[in-house]
Image (cartoon, grey):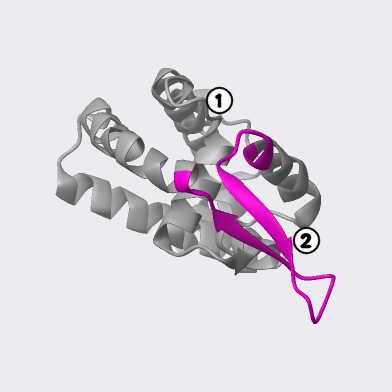
Amino acid sequence: MEKKVAQNLQENGPATVAVDQQLCFAVYSAAHAFNRAYKPLLEKLGLTYPQYLVLLVLWQGDGITVKAIGDVLGLDSGTLSPLLKRLEATGLISRNRDGKDERQVFIVLTDKGRALEADAANVFTDIGLATGCSQQQVDDLRSSLQTLSHNLASATPVR
């Protein structure tokens, strides 16, 4: 498929492609639709989408470093630090410096943060229903998007 796209571009030149025919626009539109779908569900929990993502990582196993969270989510510490400060201010997490290495900060769920997991369980189900997709379609789409993301991240510029 990649070769066909590249070959078409070489044969026909860089023709202007309508925005609704752009893969990047389809992904962009889907991301915005997800944000709109998540917003009311997360507002009930007092969370933003990035905060929810951090909590999803911590609910899988807390007591991990800021760097580890950043690695999972693809976020740098400059983006994570203010987000984590807000989560700490709401009483959902605590940030603990490593006694041996002050540069290491471990993030630990509080009891309130652990309890929120039960309330957030319906978010996954509600979003799944909102997609209108079967579980197989969701799995296939997620896999395709992960492949796309990997390919784009490892691509070298053509020109």
Pointers 1 and 2 in contact (C-beta within 8 Å): no
Q: Please state if 69 lies on the left or on the right of 23 as rendered.
A: right
Q: Is residue 24 visible?
A: no
Q: Is residue 77 visible?
A: yes
Say which quadrant the C terminus sits in.
bottom right
Q: Mark 2: which amino acid?
A: Arg
Q: Which residue is mark 1?
A: 19
What kind of element bears circle 1? helix
Q: Please state if 122 lies on the left or on the right of 159 as rendered.
A: left
Residue 157 in the image: x percent, y percent?
Answer: 73, 62
Say which quadrant the N terminus sits in.
bottom left
Q: Which residues are magenta?
A: 87-111
Q: Mark 1: which amino acid?
A: Val
Q: Please state if 78 lies on the left or on the right of 132 as rendered.
A: right
Q: Nearer the viewer, residue 8 or 21?
A: 21
- 62 part of magenta stretch: no
Q: Which residue is mark 2?
A: 159
